[in-house]
Amino acid sequence: MHDIPRRQFLINGSVALTALALLEASRAYAFPSRPGEAIIRWLDQPTENPDPVGIQTQLVWENLDSWITPNDEFFSISHFDQPVIDASTWKLEIGGLVKRPLRLTLDDIKARPRQEVVFTIECSGNHGFPFFTGGIGNARWAGMPLAPILEEAGIRENGIEVVFWGTDAGEIAARDLKFNQNFARSMSVEDAMSSDNILCYEMNGAPLPAPNGFPLRLIAPGWYGIANTKWLKRIEVRDRRFMSLLMGRDYVTVREEDNDGEPVWAETSVGRWRLKSAPARVTQVGSDYRIIGAAWGAAIDRVEVKIDGGPWVPAAIDHSEEAEYAWKIWSLDWPTPAPGEHTVTSRAIDTAGLVQPAMDDPIIAKKHTYWESNGQVTRRIRIG
Ligand SMILES: Nc1nc2c(c(=O)[nH]1)N[C@H]1C(S)=C(S)[C@@H](COP(=O)(O)O)O[C@H]1N2
Ligand SMILES: [Mo]
């Protein structure tokens, strides 16, 4: 290898990487589909999206036919403007309470060790409104692991919080003030140092698309969407808990709890994802129907399906494509259902035995805000 000029080697290397990326993008993932099947649409469709700027794309559940969600069908949420970033001048700053502040270009970041994770990202508002039921997608994300770069910068003794600032900004109101502020979310140093977290520049083998955070975003597997700051600009270590709009005012779940008969109103910042599943589509080949869905938000042990308020029936989990932080695809054959209208409900059960709550479970019924709506999803369908 020593006689190949280094530049030539780098070029060949990047050609090989591109070829790999193309292969990845064209790879067909197994899925419980059947040749010649027809898709039956649910009767209850999401209502018209009143905010096409904030919610740009949503998953159409009936279209789910692959473990990986293609980039052009991937949901996208933005709270402020959608910044257009020139990667050639962009830099990531790492500062605050660190011993060696860093400024990294995209090339610096791509030259570092690469880590991939397949992670199903869900917006914590998903299923919180009748117009918002497709805020979820599963992608293979690649980038530089976060922990080593924080170690390189050297977090000072008194650093307890890591803030991830986006490039996008908007006018924020707090108390009697109005000010311009960038998107900001934070994590404890301990959570930020998890070896799962990556600073991500690639999605399903392609450069991170603009709506999903080009050139760089945080991918924090196992956290709701909001933790995954897009269009990253600065990572800052602080000595206090951080209470921005998106940590301490919005993205706060208000729930009535019960402490030994005493009602307690708890307000908690949206953080890690929650155990959830949903029916995705019903397919038909002749008189053979099949219900297909997804389950995520915890280590999934099994999924059960209830038709028309009947008994819970175990679904089959598709083990052909699995990853720790990715949804599991499940299916249930539904031979010769009676013509007419039916309801289909699913519930996931995790490896610790926790059951996805019913809509009338107090944990859902006594939740007064729309975030973290992980109650059981019921869909309606007409057969025949
Ligand atoms: N900078 C920035 N990061 C952001 C957001 C944003 O508006 N700005 N939206 C968050 C929310 S609410 C979600 S659900 C996810 C959505 O990621 P996606 O648009 O790639 O699907 O990004 C998160 N990261
Ligand atoms: Mo979100």
Image (cartoon, rainbow, N blue to C red):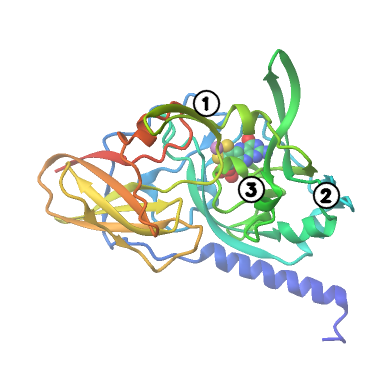
Q: Give the structural element (helix, strand or loop) at label 2.
A: loop
Residue 347 vs residue 138, the one in the foreground: 347
Pick out the residue farthest to the top: 176
Q: Earlier in the sequence, mark 1 or mark 3?
A: 1
How far across and down, in percent of the image, does residue 289 sit? 20, 54
Give the farthest residue toward the left.
Answer: 338
User: Is residue 135 toward the left or the right of residue 248 in the image?
Assistant: left
**CA–CA distance between discs 1 and 2?**
32 Å
Under mark 3, the amino acid is: Pro
Decide which of 110, 326 is in the foreground and name it: 326
**What crowding class fits label 2: few (fewer than 14 Cα within 10 Å), some (14-19), or many (20 or more)?**
few
Which residue position is annotated with label 2?
88
Residue drawn at 48 percent across, 24 percent down: 50
Q: Amino acid at mark 1?
A: Asp
Q: Position of residue 215 (x, y in %)?
A: 72, 48
* Label 3: which secondary element: loop
Q: Which residue is mark 1?
A: 51
